[in-house]
Image: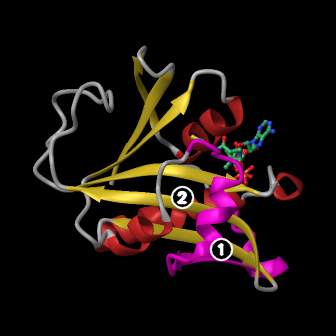
Amino acid sequence: MKHLKTFESYNGIETKISEKTEENLNFLKSHFTDMPLTLDQYKERPHIHSCDSRLNGQLVGSCIFVIRDFKPNANEIAIPIDIDYKLPRVHINYIRTLEEFRGKGIGKDIIRKIVEWSKLNNVGIITANVKLDNMESQRLFTSYGFTKSGDLTATGSNTFYLVV
Ligand SMILES: CC(C)(COP(=O)(O)OP(=O)(O)OC[C@H]1O[C@@H](n2cnc3c(N)ncnc32)[C@H](O)[C@@H]1OP(=O)(O)O)[C@@H](O)C(=O)NCCC(=O)NCCS
């Protein structure tokens, strides 16, 4: 994997696995306006996790990911059938950085933290579904080293996966 830019060391941006708060939920909801998750569900469901990026305490990026311990439904995700499903899977549901901070490596820092967390938590694979026309997000995942898998034609997305 190629060297990853880390932004935090020289500009004060701190990225970490974070508390699940109304602030980071709303940060994502303001972009993903059809997100069905309520604050209570977000806070109470133990398999839902959050990672965020802050500059001087202000949110500049956030992500919700979930941990799953079952083989994915073929309609939900497209990954090769020869992958060993015995280990839990992390699925990245939502990731967003502030527009004025994009292209500076914050998205990659968030993914890097989730990969580190996954290694510590015995996760076998990380997946994400990305819309076919979302070039920035496709670039984020391929640039990190994720593999693009089959189309999910029903949702107009590709699955990206990384074996950890
Ligand atoms: C997708 C998103 C989270 C990426 O965040 P980011 O902070 O810009 O990501 P990074 O700065 O770490 O960039 C990751 C890679 O994508 C590239 N990239 C990011 N924005 C880009 C753009 N507008 N055009 C071209 N490349 C871009 C970067 O150059 C980098 O690749 P590189 O390391 O090979 O140079 C951000 O664009 C976003 O919030 N989009 C709106 C929400 C969204 O679509 N989320 C994804 C849903 S699946």
Q: Circle 2 is placed at which residue position?
A: 111
Q: Nearer the viewer, residue 140 or 156?
A: 156
Q: Residue furthest right?
A: 100
Label 1 SS:
helix
Q: Position of residue 3 (x, y in %)?
A: 62, 56
Q: Circle 1 is placed at which residue position?
A: 23
Q: Position of residue 20 (x, y in %)?
A: 50, 76
The boundaries of the magenta stretch are: 5-34
Residue at left offset 89%, top offset 56%: 100
- As for residue 107 lying within the magenta part, the answer is no
**Crowd class of label 1 (few under 14; some 14 to 19; many from 20; radius 10 Å):** few
Quadrant of the rendered image containing residue 71: top left
- Asked if residue 62 lies left or right of residue 84, the reply is right
Quadrant where the C terminus is found in the figure = bottom left
Q: Which comes sooner in the sequence, label 2 or label 1?
A: 1
Can residue 94 be spotted in the picture?
Answer: yes
- Asked if residue 56 lies left or right of residue 18, the reply is right
Q: Give the alpha-carbon distance from disc 2 to disc 1, as whole Å.
A: 20 Å
Q: Name the residue type under label 1.
A: Glu
Label 2 beta carbon less than 8 Å to ligand 1: yes
Label 2 SS:
helix
